[in-house]
Amino acid sequence: MKKILDNISLYLSFLKISLKEILIYRLDCIVGIISQLIVQAVSLIFIFIVFQNTENIAGWNFRQILLLYGVTRIAIGISGYCFDGLYDIGPKYMQNGEFDKILLRPVHPLISIIGASREFVSLADFFIGLGITIYMLIELSIPITILLVVKIIFFSVIGALIIGAINTIFSISSFWTYKSNEVIWSFYNIYAFAEYPIDIYNRFIKILITLILPFAFVAYYPTMDYLGLNNYMLYLSPFIAIILWIIAVKLWNIALNKYRSTGT
Amino acid sequence: MVQTMIALGKMQLKRYNIYKSNFYLFTFNRIIEVVVYIFVWQAIYYQTGNAGGFTIEEMTTYYILVITFSSFALWGINEDMAHSIRNGQINRELLNPISYFKYYFGVNLGELAFATVVGFATFIICSFFWQLVLPVNLLDFILCIFVMILGVPITFFIQMIVGTVGFYTNSIWGMQILRKAIIQIFSGIIAPITLFPLWFQEISKWLPFKELIYTPVNIWLGNVEMNEIFFIIIKQIIWGIILYFIARIFFNHAVKNITINGG
Amino acid sequence: MPIIEVKNLVKQYKIIEKQDGLLGYFKNLIKPQYKKIIAVNNINFEIKEGELVGYIGENGAGKSTTIKMLTGLLTPTSGKIVVNGLIPNEKRIQNNKNIGAVFGQKTQLWWDLPVIESFRLIKKIFKIPENEYRKNLKRFTEILDLEDLLDKQVKNLSLGQKMRCEIAATFLHNPKIVYLDEPTIGLDVFVKENIRKFIKEINKEKKTTVILTTHDLKDIEDVCDRIILLDRGQIIYDGEKQKFKDIYGKYTLAEIIVSSKNLSVKDKLQSNVFEIIEENEKEMKIKFKHDETTIVKIMNDISEYCVIEDIHMRESELEDILKEIYKGAYKNGANNDSIRKNAIKKI
């Protein structure tokens, strides 16, 4: 337990340094935030266009879908800020041979990498998500009680952890592929699965996003709860986050060992 | 010159080949990218019997073609270029007896070759899962490919512009997302452009992005009149020239900066 | 007709002066304070075809700046450079056809592909005729011992292996001029020797002009015929290596191990025929010239103040001379002038 706490505090101090680093490159930061807004626009445009052709999707109306979208974005924003370093493994560390330097640190390499997350611009994601969520809660006349606020905070963090764990698993590919960031970018598209009610998918994908890559727990089940639609799946999500992280770290270690033994 | 560029393209393609897993991962990701859109439209179609004015087969074909073509419009050398600027490798590349643009155009050919392979595989795999509409005649198919090829210089110069930003910033990550998002919106990757508001359609008519994906897909589906195609080709050529000059001037300015102030 | 001609070359950089603190940061944002730095200050030299020139100087003396200007990567602030009849920064691409360059650890090899792939690409880019390419590849493989490396991915090579391949890649298209900026940095002795041997042999065979900057003076000692010595952007010596050593280096260094020494000999003993460079309780380093005195006389003098136990002598090498020059020994008084004069004479 102490080891885990140690690692977490190390991680936080890394995060502080990377925040300072990003402030140095202002231009990068501004462009980053603008680009993030446009990425948001891409998803929102699709939703708007779809609702010009229909009243509801699988029984969810425009506002409910937007709420789901907002809740997803909050989680993605948090995870983007905290776990973005994973995207750099290929281009930043592997290609420059800097990865060996990280292996020499007296810290688990995963902590070093995640800690170097510089993705300040995800905060744009987070705030847009938050804005849309609040606006839609009001529009849908859902009373914003303390309980609801606590729930949203709690399940958003859990959602971010789930995404982080999945990213960690997929970052393993960086050990062996060139241009892993292209791979990771495509995962922004996988997140899109979480942005719609799972009823629209066929059985295969339903199983995929509830059991294998449990994106449904990131936003869909929590949002159902916020909307007052009964479901008990929601309360599984903390356990899923924990299990997923255990799997992620185990897999990562296995991959790391394999990488070390084959060498570069 | 052409031989040299092809040799460079081959080099880049070989880099992808070294990591075999790239091919599977990229193909898989292409498919994932489109699945959500297709499901959403399917849900709407089953409810209302209408998918934005298309049949569901047309809509599905639309998205699968979009994703087949999209790597061709989205991939390129800007990452490699920015990387070489950042670590000073650019000094080496400037010492090649071939201009920097030609050098990277060659490398870009490799990227496009890989995009073609992935696109082809994506299409084949998708055709197992969904019923797809094929071009009615050979001419449509040829024109579709021709318009795609006209897009090559356009995407390349955009890549060069974004890559050149690397001279001024630490990473071009944000610019890359921006480039990708703009192409996604204006080229019809998100949804067929006819479903957008009229003012948007008017803007996209004059921008070069629509012809990267939306127009070739519609030529494939037989939705484009022959007389429109002439206008499209002229527009592509003009945009190619405009972007060439922008890329050139911007790049030369940046290089002049480093040759005066050092790397 | 010299292959490289440099006249009144000046390079001045404008750099933003960094200011501390948040306030300084914003000040810089609004109105940056520039500082001018003269990296190369009015240098002149000519290099003939087939020469092996050592371009040396301390860090920041302006060596790399000069090389970058010669390759056309930097534009001179003023002055003239003609390489092979071309002005490099104006006709860079044309100039590139005739030159090769190694910049420290920057590489022209493709990081994740086998070495031979990069060679084949270079063949295409430089349009090297097939038989020429084969001949060079065979010869280079032989001298640099590349046989087992060609099929390996570049990322899997060691530093020395990588540099050997890099050198081969640089000479593959028979460049007329090759600029080597720190080619031996960080390499072990065997690789260094290998590379030196290669440069010498190719120079003999193909009359390749080589300009070498390095901090390892063994490289210069081994490879170069001519030295251009740069100090704070100015040439302070330009001429034959041997002559340089003859004029400034005809002294002998002696290390004398002593005991029962409790005073500073340097203070007691004033001599104008030898000089004590360093001394401590157990050891003294001295320097003298053979035509002015002998070691026996010196030992005689010193033995008045201590007991001599052992003695090592060696002839001064390039490194010793340069150390002296950098320390300023030749910068004051007559010696400095003679160096300058010599430099001017050469031009």
Image (cartoon, coloured by chain):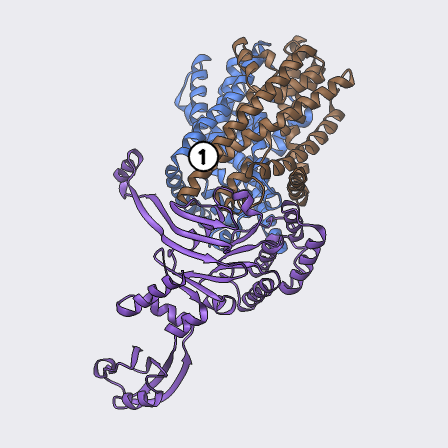
Looking at the image, residue C55 lies above or below residue A159: below
Measured as percent of width and height from the top left, residue C223 is found at 52, 66
Check the image and name the residue furthest to the front: C1
Give the x, y percent position of residue A203: 68, 25
Q: Estimate the x, y position of residue B120 in percent, counting from the top left.
A: 72, 30
Is residue C279 visible to us here?
no
Nearest the eye: C223 or B215: C223
**Residue A182 figure quarter:** top right
* Chain letter for the part of the structure drawn in blue: A
Residue drawn at x 28%, y 40% as measured from the top left? C33
In the rendered view, does B224 fall on the left or right side of C314? right
Name the residue tied to disc 1: B253
- Give how far across and how far down residue A4 sits, in percent: 46, 47
Left or right, residue B23 beside residue B178: right
Judged left or right of residue B119, residue A44 is left
Name the residue nearer the viewer: C186 or B7: B7
Q: Which chain is brown?
A: B
Secondary structure category for the residue under label 1:
helix
Circle 1 marks a residue in which chain?
A: B
What color is chain C drawn in? purple
- Amino acid type, label 1: His
Residue B141 image-quadrant placement: top right
